[in-house]
Amino acid sequence: MLKKTAFYAGSAAMALFLSACASQQPAPVVAGTSSMGSASTASNPYGATPYDPNAASSAAGDAPYVPPVATNAPAPTYSGSTGGAYVPSYAPVDVNAATHTVVRGDTVYNISKRYGINQNDLRSWNNLADNTISVGQTLRVKPAGYVAPASSAASTAATPAATATPTPATTATVSTGGTRTVSGITWQRPTVGNVVTNFGGNNKGVDIAGNAGQSVVAAADGKVVYAGSGLRGYGNLVIVQHNSTFLTAYGHNQSLMVNEGQTVKRGQIIAKMGNTDAPRNQLHFEVRQNGKPVNPTTYVPF
C-alpha cells in the first residue's frame, strides 16, 4: 500500500513539473547591434548621415560625413579623448598638392572641401571602402598622373580658391567689454550676458545666456572657415580661424551674419543669438588650440 501511494505521489509530482515546464514561454529575443555593426551617432554633436555607397554621386554623394563618436573610436579621427566632441580640421592646405597627410580632425568631407574635389573621387583615388582615415595616412587629392606646378610649394589656402582675396565682412563692430592679449591674440567677449555653464566635463566651452537677436561678435581677428547648421548639437554655427593654432566656435545662433571665406575683425558682428539646438537663448562659445578645446576664460576677459 505504501509503495502504491509513493508511486502515485511521484507520478503527480512529475506531472506538475512537466506541466510547469510546458507553460514557460521561450525567452524573448532582443534585437541589437553587434560590435561589428554601425556605431550609433546619438551622442555625437557633429553627427551626420553615414555615407551610402549606392547613393547618387551628385549633391547627396558630396554631403558632409562625420565619423561617429564611440567609446572605442580610433584616435586618428577625433580631436579629443574618448567621449569628447569631434572638431573638424580647417588647417590651410596647398590646393595644388598631389597628396595630403591626414591630421587630427580631418574627414573625407573637409579634406575634399579644402582641396576643391569630390568626396567620391577622393575615395576612389585612395581605394577607400568607406570614410575611415587615420592620422599620418597619405591620401591622393589629385588623380594618378597629376604633376603639381613648380610654384605650388609656396601657395597655401584654407579654401579651394587659392588665389582669391578674402572678402572682409561688412557688419558693424560692437564693444562687449574689455580686451585681453594672450598668445599674441587680442581677445574680447563674444557677447554680453552671464556665463551659465562653465568649461569642463562634457562642456567644451562656455554657455552665455542672453536675449534672442542680440549681437554675437568675433572674439578676435580672423577668417570665417565655417558658417552653417550641419554640425548636430550646435545649431547655426560660426567657426573663426585666428591663426594656425587658435580657432573659436559660436553655436546656437538665431541667424548668421557672415559667410565662409570672409575676414572679420575683433568685435565685428558675426551672428544673432538664438536657441537652435538649445533649450534657451544662449551662445555656446569655444576656444580651440590645435583642435583641442581649452578654457575660454584663460583667453577671453569674462
Image (spheres, rainbow, N blue to C red):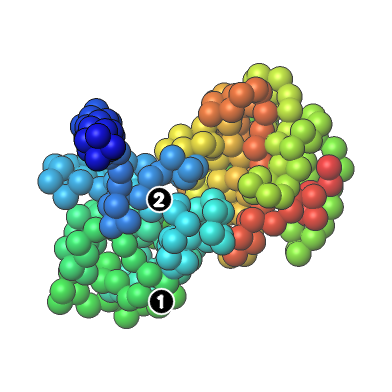
Q: Which residue is the site of mark 1?
A: 136
How far apart in space, not on screen, are marks 2 and 1 (Cα)? 20 Å
| Residue located 44% across and 75% down the image | 154
What is the crowding at mark 1: few (fewer than 14 residues within 10 Å), some, or many (at least 20)?
few
Relative to residue 58, is residue 217 drawn left or right? right
Q: What residue is at 24 percent from the left and 54 percent from the top?
A: 118
Q: Position of residue 296 (x, y in %)?
A: 74, 50
Q: Identify which residue is drawn at 76% across, 43% down.
A: 198
Q: Which amino acid does label 1 sit on?
A: Gly
59 above or below 130? Answer: above
Identified by mark 2, the residue type is: Pro
Residue at numbered disc 2: 68
Residue 178 place in picture, x, y as percent: 87, 43
Q: Determine the image quadrant of residue 151.
A: bottom left
40 or 96, which lies in front? 40
Using the rendered view, name the quadrant where residue 182 is placed.
bottom right
